Image (cartoon, rainbow, N blue to C red):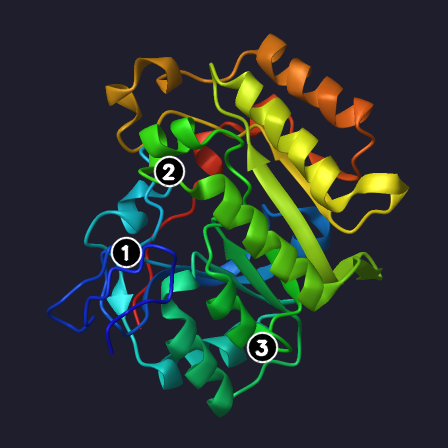
Amino acid sequence: MLCDLCPRNCHIERSEERFGYCGVGALPKIARAALHFDEEPPISGANGAGTIFFCGCNLRCVFCQNYEISARDTGTVITPYQLSEEYKRLEQLGAQNIEFVTPSHYVGAILESLTYYRPRVPLVWNSSGYDKVETLRQLDGVIDVYLPDFKYSDNALAKRLSNCPDYVETATAAITEMLRQCGDPVIEDGMMKRGVIIRHLVLPSHIKNSLGVLTAIKRNWCENHHTSALVSLMAQYMPAGRAADYPEINRRLTKREYQKVLDKLYDLELDGFAQELSSADEKYVPEWNYNN
């Protein structure tokens, strides 16, 4: 199959020997499958999300905090059946959902895995937001909660930092499709059962981009005091990946920068979550130690 799962449309026949733009073959390659407690409260809950970190990425941002698994040859290749066994194991550990992290380039394998075992807890799709609407439609009725990024309101910045000159319109269409599938947020006993949480990571020196993102979220999905999506504002940025090659992002956020974005969040009356600056700490980066 010539791969066209993501908006890159690289049309490469992905295999053990041939990789797509995402940097991986067709079979799932994972770096971690464990309980994860550092997500938004209705995702982690008390017991932790059953998080599966996939290797490779169709966006590959220069500042990626998971650069070791998104852009380097790390991780273990498994079959869709083995992936389904991970769902069982995580459920037995008490996971309150199964969270797929950076899964967009493995849609076919994930759908196959669910034919072997469908978890009894909600399924969470945690992606960069750079998703193809046609591919997302394959997940209609399968995914319960979408957790997309909305990284950029400026395509020039998206091109510079993610080689992605069509990010804004692509992510906007993708999130609109996610909301069509899942509707308004449904939270029961403190846990997200259905809905969409839009994440945004604030980048140093690019506060205007963040203000534009929040404005776009309000305009597109949260007008007229109707909350179609929750917002998660993230302050955890630390220079990682190839950030040293980009001087304006080769530092952490300042308190003043983040406060400007927080003020905009409050002015727009967007519902959701906001991290504290103290979240920018290496202790929150998971260990990549999966071995099946």
> Gap between marks 2 and 3, in whole Å?
43 Å
> Gap between marks 1 and 2, in whole Å?
17 Å
The front one of 281 and 134 is: 134
> Gap between marks 1 and 3, in whole Å?
31 Å
Name the spot of residue 143 as percent of width and height, x first: 61, 71
Does the residue at mark 1 contact the one at mark 2 (Cβ under 8 Å)?
Answer: no
Q: Which residue carries the number 2 mark? A: 165
Label 3 crowd (10 A; few <14 / some 14-19 / many >=20): few
Of marks 2 and 3, which one's residue comes earlier in the chain? 3
Name the spot of residue 76 as percent of width and height, x first: 26, 66
Question: Which disc is residue 92 wearing?
Answer: 3
Of marks 1 and 3, which one's residue comes earlier in the chain? 1
Name the spot of residue 228 as percent of width and height, x first: 78, 51
Residue 91 left/right relative to 287: right
| Residue that protrudes farthest toward the top in the picture | 256
Query: Which of pointers 1 and 2 indicates the residue nearer the eye?
Result: 2
Q: Is residue 42 visible?
A: yes
Q: Please tell me which residue is depicted at 46% across the width and 80% down the height of the picture.
A: 111
Q: Please tell me which residue is depicted at 31% across the width and 49% down the height of the picture.
A: 70
Quarter of the rendering occupied by the N terminus: bottom left
Q: Is mark 2 on a helix, strand or loop?
A: loop
Query: Which of pointers 1 and 3 indicates the residue nearer the eye?
Result: 1
What is the three-letter code of the residue carrying label 3? Gln
What is the three-letter code of the residue carrying label 2? Pro
Label 2 crowd (10 A; few <14 / some 14-19 / many >=20): some
Q: Which residue carries the number 1 mark? A: 22
Q: Please tell me which residue is depicted at 38% across the width and 19% down the height of the picture.
A: 249
Residue 71 left/right relative to 141: left
Q: Can residue 46 be seen in this view?
A: no
Instruction: Indicate whether 236 appears above or below 254.
Output: below
Of marks 1 and 2, which one's residue comes earlier in the chain? 1
Quarter of the rendering occupied by the C terminus: bottom left
